[in-house]
Amino acid sequence: MTATEREQRSTGADALCAAAYDEVGGARTGMALVAVGGYGRGELAPYSDLDVVLVLDEGVEAGEVAERLWYPLWDSGTAVDHSVRTLPEMVAAADSDLRVALGLLDVRHLAGDADLTLRLRGTMLAHWRRHARERLPALRELVRGRHELVGELAHLSVPDVKEAEGGLRDATVLKALVTTWLVDVPHTELENSRQALLDVRDLVQQSAGRASDRIHPEVWSELATGLGLADARSAQVHVRTLGRRLTHLSRLTWRRVDDYLARPASVRSARRPALFPIAQGVALSGREIVLDRTARPAEDPVLLLRAAAAAAEMDAVLAPPTAARLAREVADLPDPWPDEARHLLVRLLASGRGLLPVWETLEETGALPRLLPEWERIRLLPHASAIHRFTVDRHVVETCIEASSLIRQVNRPDVLMVAALLHDIGKGSLTEHSVAGEPIARGIATRMGFEPASVDLVATLVRWHLLLAETATTRDHDDPATIERVASRVGSTEALSLLTALTEADAKAASPQAWSSWRAGLVLELSRRVHTSLDTGRPFPSAVDEEVEIPRAVRNGAVSFAVEATPDGTRVTAIAPDRVGLLADFSGLFALQRLPVRSARAWVQEGYSVSSWDVAESGLDVPFLRERYAAIAEGRVDPTSRLRPDPRALAPTVEVRADASLAATVLEVRAADQPGVVHRVCAALAQLDVAVRSAHVETLGPQAVDVFYLQEAAAGVLSDTRASEAAHAVRAALAGQPG
């Protein structure tokens, strides 16, 4: 699909409309048929509607023309979005609806009175410019609301090339902003990106066979063929690059609009803003960072970082022409970097929200490879995990932004910020990305001029940046082996403090649910225990060693439930005479009520079973739990028969982690996230007379990762034979097969 084909479609539609107008006897004066919106721009997609308006001069009656005009178009099978309005009514419609106003900026004559069309076009443009200052804030909110609703084209798993941020709708808004004469946009860059995205839209509609603007995963290969690209990955990079470029232009233009509207009227008319020196070679012009007359890029290798850091810290625009000039002319940084360069990079990374627009400008102008050539490894690389809302490169920038608010919690904020920048640099490798990223990060940190001990810290953080999150949610904090596992890898309280901050920043950057109060509590509690162990050389005291009071009713054979509200749900503590299968009944209770279990811990005290369950539900009460439990314990309800696995789900994996604990056998289960997973595991183990000491439940997108600490009913780890038998039974239960 090309611009020529779009023009041919529009030309054919023009002839159809003109013939219909003539067929019904449309007047040559005082009446005109015009195209608006995308049709007005001559950019019809394969399945576009024809947006047309029959315009009347004041005092002119449309008569039968308004009723009969559309029938020839309908009879041809063409979809038409039509209306009939006088010229004053067109102005009123634009005043009442910003979308209409934008569409009328692209009025094009089809048939009838050409002079009326010319007057209409001139009237709409003049009206838009006259009222632009008062209408732009509302347009800003309209655009912002669409972005929040749809998302960003560069990062969506199913991109919408029209409505998403960085899509065709934004390109149309940019053209409207230029039309105000208040701001300018690089015309060639905007038009090239817009035309390329129109080509993509045409191919998407052709593939779908309908007016669709969304690119589903199965379409990428076909899209690559249509665009003449090598493969689906190349098509994704192409489309996301276009989206990112238009997003950058849009954000930059809106910043300029906001700055213009914020200026006093007396300042708006000034042709050339004054230059205010900021740093060596760098000045502030209006709200943009530029180079001053003393700047000598070819002689100053740190100038690019100096300008970028100043822009980010002042929340100003790094002027794209300035960044582009620096990308071409600035001298190469020596290896290793001078101290000033490293300090400026840290200031840039720690600038908070000011980092994102500056980093985008560095990317779009080709300046970023001058600082970090390894960035190409992760540029526009999609995340494999559904929990991530951004591509890898944008996620890294968001991690830096989150880490910038945590620098007062650590002794080495410079190491934290550089580790945040590099923590995912190994993504896209065939090996585990944290393993692949460690030597890359080590090399970059050395080039940046860090001393060897700091290089080791950066490398350690990159290698183990997933350690706290994974361990906190899938291992028993009360097991000394868990604490030793983390402590042995981290090595020092300084590294642990940095890793804790990096873990929080990484999770917050991924998505809100990745750092819920429940998950945060687990990570911070584990970090405290490991810190105590590293600081004193002794394990953190186990919560299991703390006895609870056994209620009198339980001593008489009853079951006790206690309910405690938590920030993310409810904690249920159940105490009952110990027996094999008790945890299976409790987990069945929660599963039948579709209550997601986040974590569970169980131990035996004086012959009684004590278990604590964190569930993602509030408002539970004790009578409700007691009634449902009784139905299961008495055999009136069989959870297993009601909780059948989905046969369409991926096969579960069940593995014994032999080195995860000295006191128990650890069984790791990965299965589709669906009700009853914990119950089926506990029930299968109960049939083998295997006790579940604790369970740790984690959901990552569509997958549940559950870890169970097992012991023989008479206490003690399972033998290799028994562990294998338990794994086989659990695997069969999860697959819905006989054990």
Image (cartoon, rainbow, N blue to C red):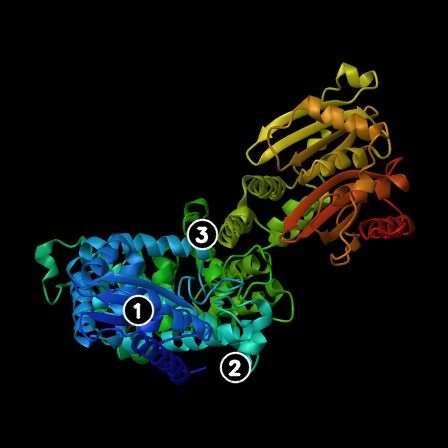
Q: Residue at x 24, y 66 (%)?
A: 55
List the residue tagged with mark 3.
403
Secondary structure beneath label 1? loop
Q: Nearer the viewer, residue 739 or 465?
A: 739
Give the distance between the C-alpha atoms of the residues marked 1 and 3, in whole angstroms: 48 Å
Q: Is residue 352 visible?
A: no
List the residue tagged with mark 1.
36
Q: Residue at x 71, y 27 (%)?
A: 625
Q: Nearer the viewer, residue 145 or 671?
A: 145
Mark 1 vs mark 2: which is more N-terminal?
Answer: 1
Q: In the image, what residue type sits under mark 1?
A: Val
Q: In the image, what residue type sits under mark 3?
A: Ala
Percent of width and height locating residue 9: 40, 80
CA neighbours of label 3 inside 10 A, class few (<14), some (14 to 19), many (20+): many
Q: Is residue 227 above or below residue 47?
A: below
Q: Please identify the quarter of the rendering in which residue 330 is found.
A: bottom left
Q: Is residue 3 left or right of residue 544?
A: left
